[in-house]
Image (spheres, rainbow, N blue to C red):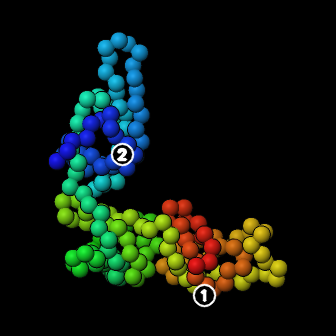
Amino acid sequence: MALIGANELKRRTLITVDGQPYTVLEVFFATPSARGAATMVRTRLRHLLTGAVQEKSFKASEKFAEPDVQLTPASFLYADGDGLHFMDETTYEQFMLDEEQIGDARGYLKEGTTVQVLKYNGAPISLELPQFVELTVTATEPGLRGDTAAGGATKPATLETGLTVRVPLFIKAGEVVRVNTQTGEVAGRA
């Protein structure tokens, strides 16, 4: 397994620090002005298992192992009292993640949605949503005569997953909209 040097760190790099898996959120290189002083690498890291964010500094000469992490495609099957159930699309094995592991992503999941599941040492720990999902509007206020997209006005709408978003005034209940999973904003009709 190849080691990653601290001076090679970039955003979204996965590393092992003190036996724990982290993803790099930000990297700052601090070059001291004193002669012979070592370059320091300041980082903000997110723990893959707990989601905790912390800042750590390393010498540029330090090396890190890559954690046993892989992304695999999976389909969302259903949710029940125990958690959310998925099927690995490569092995067809079913597994479950609880609400805490899913977090805010729950509002973007409907049956059949394909996601990328992050596995650490073979066990699923979290998921990555596609950038856009298509969801049906189940409830929204009726638009008024003359409503147009050019006005830029929006109204609240409830989607089939229970998620509430702002939609343009001309969107009606029963229409399918594209929602950006990073921002939570509607990108238009599907």
Q: Which residue is mark 1?
A: 174
Farthest-out residue, right: 146
In which image quadrant can residue 185 be found? bottom right
Mark 1 secondary-structure assignment: loop
**Residue shown at 28% from the left, 56% from the top:** 49
Residue 21's label in the rendered image is none
Q: Is residue 79 visible?
A: no
Disc 1 crowd rating (10 Å Cα; few below 14, some 14-19, many 20+) is some
Question: How many C-alpha atoms fall within 10 Å of the one at disc 2: few (<14), some, or many (≥20)?
Answer: some
Q: Are marks 2 and 1 in contact (CB under 8 Å)?
A: no
Spot occupied by residue 171 in the image (x, y as percentages of width and height): 67, 80
The amino acid type, in three-letter code, at marker 1 is: Gly
Residue at image location 24% in from the left, 57% down from the top: 69
Mark 2 to mark 1: distance in Å? 41 Å
Name the side, left or right, on which 81 lies relative to 148: left
Q: Is residue 71 visible?
A: yes
Q: Which residue is mark 2?
A: 24
Going from N to C along the chain, the mark reached first, 2 or 1, is: 2
Number of numbered discs visible in the structure rendering: 2
Amino acid at circle 2? Val
**46 up-or-down from 95: above or below:** above
Task: Identify the residue at image location x=40%, y=83%.
Answer: 111
Q: Position of residue 39 (x, y in %)?
A: 34, 24
Residue 133 placed where, x, y %?
49, 73
Quadrant of the rendering where the C terminus is positioned = bottom right
Q: Residue at x 30, y 63 (%)?
A: 71
Which quarter of the picture shows residue 142?
Answer: bottom right
Compare residues 172 and 38 and report the one nearer the observer.
Answer: 38
